[in-house]
Image: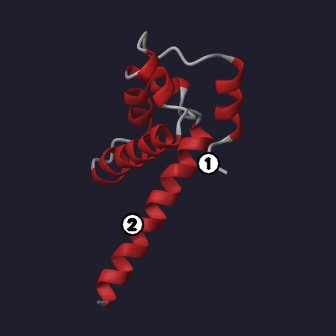
């Protein structure tokens, strides 16, 4: 229902999130607004690092890991590749729409 990868949900279920000692932070990320934030952040990192900066998906994963979000976001190459492929599709579609306009 939340469009979260099965592996992410399974990891949340098996081990409690311990991003921070603050209970508000721990409760935020598995919530609907927290998931929305993580999705927007992940997409923004792909746009800036991969599409604009040509740095690759490894740096996207590295930033997420540095911030401790690797426990909440699927970090496998396959998962990040799916995100990046979708970002590329949207960029190409936007370019085509703007070109026609």
- Residue 1 image position (x, y, % from top left): 67, 51
Q: Is mark 1 on a helix, strand or loop?
A: loop
Circle 1 crowding by C-alpha within 10 Å: few under 14, some 14–19, many from 20 = few
Which is more toward the observer, 46 or 15? 15
Going 33% across and 90% down the picture, which residue do you hit? Answer: 100
Q: Residue at left 54%, top 23%?
A: 71
Name, please, the residue furthest toward the bottom.
100
The x, y position of residue 40, in whole percent, is: 40, 47
Give the quarter of the image for residue 5: top right
Q: Which mark is residue 2?
A: 1
Residue found 66% across the figure and 16% down from its top:
15
SS state under label 2? helix
Separation (CA) of disc 2 from disc 1: 23 Å
Q: Quadrant of the C terminus?
A: bottom left
Report the side of 63 relative to 74 (left or right): left
Total numbered labels placed on residues in the image: 2
- Where is residue 46 drawn, in percent x and y? 39, 47
Q: Residue at x 38, y 23 (%)?
A: 67
Q: Quadrant of residue 92?
A: bottom left
Classify mark 2: residues with Cα within 10 Å, few (<14), some (14-19) or many (20+).
some
State the residue position of label 2: 91
Q: Position of residue 18 (x, y in %)?
A: 51, 14
């Amino acid at each position: 229902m939340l469009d979260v990868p099965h592996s992410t949900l399974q990891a949340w279920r098996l081990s409690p999130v311990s991003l921070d000692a603050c209970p508000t932070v721990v409760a935020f990320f598995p919530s609907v607004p927290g998931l929305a934030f993580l999705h927007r952040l992940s997409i923004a990192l792909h746009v800036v690092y991969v599409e604009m900066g040509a740095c690759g998906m490894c740096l996207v994963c590295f930033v997420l890991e540095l911030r401790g979000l690797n426990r909440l976001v699927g970090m496998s190459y396959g998962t990040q590749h799916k995100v990046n492929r979708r970002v590329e599709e949207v960029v190409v579609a936007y370019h085509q729409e703007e070109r026609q306009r």
